[in-house]
Amino acid sequence: MGYDASGIKLSNIEYFPGYAITQHLGLVQGSTVRAKHVGRDIMASLKNIVGGELKGYTELLNESRQEAVDRMVAQARAVGANAVINVRFSTANIAAGAAELLAYGTAVVLERRG
Amino acid sequence: MGSYSNPEVPHEVNVSEKTPLRDFLRLSLGVCLVTVAVVVVVFFAARLFAPQIPFRYEAALNDVVAQKPASDAAPTCQSESEAALQTLADELARTMELPDEMSIRVHLRADSEPNAFASLGGNVMVNRGLLEHIQSENALAMVLAHEIAHIKHRDPIVSIGGGVAVAVLFSALIGNSDGGALVGWAIGLTQMSFSREQESAADEAALAALQKRYGYTNGADEFFTYITQEYPEISKIPAFLSTHPTPPERVKQIQSGFALTPPILMPLSVELKCEFQETGSGN
Amino acid sequence: MGDLIALGFVVILLIVGFVFGSIGQSRHYRSIKTREFRLRHILLFNEKMPPTQYAGQEFALVSGSVIMGSDYFRQMIAGLKGIFGGRLTSFETMLDRGRREAILRMKEEAERMGANAIFNVRLETSTLSFSQQGNREGKGGLACAELMAYGTAWRAPAASPAANAGNPQTL
């Protein structure tokens, strides 16, 4: 079920019917810079002859994004939040073969009403 | 509150790839046509403008690309023969009123094939085979004057100009760092391919020079008569395929201007007649 | 001779790229269409406010991503199009496949948590200069892009099972 956030709820929206935000705890973020390794690169080059999904890269990026989320969640837990809302992702190329994955959002305490 | 639903959307609107193979062929054809058009335009533009290139640049270009003349096992009388050839060529050049900046440099090559050709920068190559197979100075003068006329008409630079321009264009486009090699290759490929018009013009100028120098043109046909006899297969090449007028044609053309009373031809000087040692074929 | 071998190599790559690229593409589209049909009960909106039926329901961030590469043949077409201009139809197809795949993966995640709608769906495309030295100079390299979809999935309200059973296309 989505990202493994171990008890912290994640969402990219900011209005939750049936819930109340009792505390807004500020911006939290997690980021990671990952480089591919040569083996994957060679496989991807071969795969690029016939086209289609470059699975090695997809996995790599998913792992990296999970790590960015983990770090964001760690910040959220540290400030005493139980949810991160309005989460955004961004990807940036730092250099050839290296990408930064960034996740950020607002740490809040969310309580179910009624 | 309104209802929420997701009716089917037409996904095809975002994709318009129908005939990738036909696209590819059309695009490739387009690229080929554009390339050919550019090459043709550059080639002929370069030939058109080549005669405007100052002669000293032509000489400089030759210094860059010229192959080293084969100097292996030159006969002892090589330098004397070459000097005598040079003297004759200089006299002819004066007769032909070459522009001041042009100078002729004759090289004698240890090649048994009877031939001579004009090269970039006023260089005329004469194979020793030529000297062995002609008897009169008149015949030699005809050949030399013919090559000098090519140089005067800027035929070598015109002949390679197109190829060099195309080579330079491609090395610039491809980003080939080895542009010099490409240019050299283009020169090698296009060298000595003068058109029939250029050849006829050179023959005409050479005959005029002979007329001026000796007072007659008799004997000018000797080399071409020899070629006709020794290499009959050259004469059989259909005229439209050959760059040179066929030897029989040239003989006929040359003989049409002869004086009616055959004068006594000039013999080849002793230096030129120097007996060469067999030095092996000129490769 | 070396040039001839290189040319032959390119031709082989073009043929392999065309044949396998086309097969892969139609197979992928078939898979996309079946899965889209199967997952059509999960509705997508990029509105930020879920309706009040979902009051108090479970929600979670769901996402799907895929990195798509173009085949050699279609990259060549794109390269040639770069000279003449015009629509890069081969890349359109690649990105369309990738985006629908990413959405499907997001929906599959939502399905696992029993969601029937995803709100605030965001689609992102990023190019990746992952591979090959050529990319640093801006030429050559792989034509590849990451397509990502993410949003907040909401578990179906238990209160209205009848409505869902009757018309899976409506909440």
Image: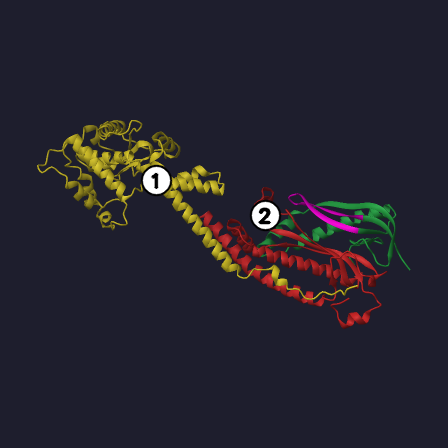
Label 1 CA crowd tier, 10 Å (few <14, some 14–19, many 20+): few
Q: Secondary structure at mark 1?
A: helix
Which image quarter: residue B128? top left
Disc 2 chain ID: C
Residue found at the very far left of the displayed protein: B261
Give how far across and how far down residue B205 sits, in percent: 22, 36
Q: Colour of chain B?
A: yellow
- Asked whether residue A81 is drawn in magenta, I would say no
Q: Which residue is found at the position 31% from the left and 32% from the top? A: B123
- Asked whether residue A90 is drawn in magenta, I would say yes
Distance from Cα at disc 1 to Cα at disc 2: 41 Å
Give how far across and how far down residue B73 sits, in percent: 31, 32
Q: What residue would you read off at disc 1?
A: B48
Q: Nearer the viewer, residue C116 or B244?
A: C116
- Which quadrant of the rendered structure holds the N terminus of chain B? bottom right
Q: Which residues are magenta?
A: A86-105
Q: Colour of chain C?
A: red
- Discs 1, 2 touching: Cβ within 8 Å: no
Give the amino acid type for the residue marked by disc 1 in the picture.
Leu
